[in-house]
Image: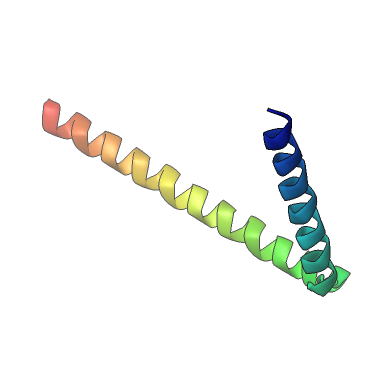
Amino acid sequence: MKDKLKQWVAKLSGFTGEVRVEMIKSTWPTRSELVESTIVVVFTVAMLSLFVGLSDAVIINLVRLLLR
């Protein structure tokens, strides 16, 4: 049982070391890039929400007309 625990701790330690190395390699966006990306995401979500909402309203009204 102790051997399994030691192996698990060794694997976890190796994994966290690899994560640390990869985090150092990665490049982070600048503040302006982050703001631009955020604006694009918010705009896209708003447009998609509007499309889904309008599509839902149209489909509901079509079903109501068909069921009369």
Nearer to me, 22 or 56: 22
Q: Is residue 6 above or below residue 44?
A: above
Q: Position of residue 19 (x, y in %)?
A: 77, 59
Quadrant hosting residue 8: top right
Residue in view at x 58 percent, y 52 percent: 46
Placement of the N terminus among the 4 image quadrants: top right
Q: Is residue 1 above or below residue 30?
A: above
Residue in view at x 72 percent, y 61 percent: 38
Quadrant hosting residue 28: bottom right
Nearer to me, 68 or 29: 29
Q: Position of residue 5 (x, y in %)?
A: 72, 34
- Left or right for 31, reference 6: right
Nearer to me, 45 or 16: 16
Quadrant hosting residue 66: top left
Q: Position of residue 23 (x, y in %)?
A: 81, 65
Q: Is residue 21 above or below residue 67?
A: below
Display colour scheme? rainbow
Placement of the C terminus among the 4 image quadrants: top left
How many numbered marks are there? Answer: 0
Residue in view at x 76 percent, y 62 percent: 18
Q: Position of residue 7 (x, y in %)?
A: 71, 43
- Left or right for 48, reference 19: left
- Left or right for 40, reference 58: right
Residue in view at x 81 percent, y 58 percent: 17
- Left or right for 50, reference 27: left
Nearer to me, 61 or 2: 2
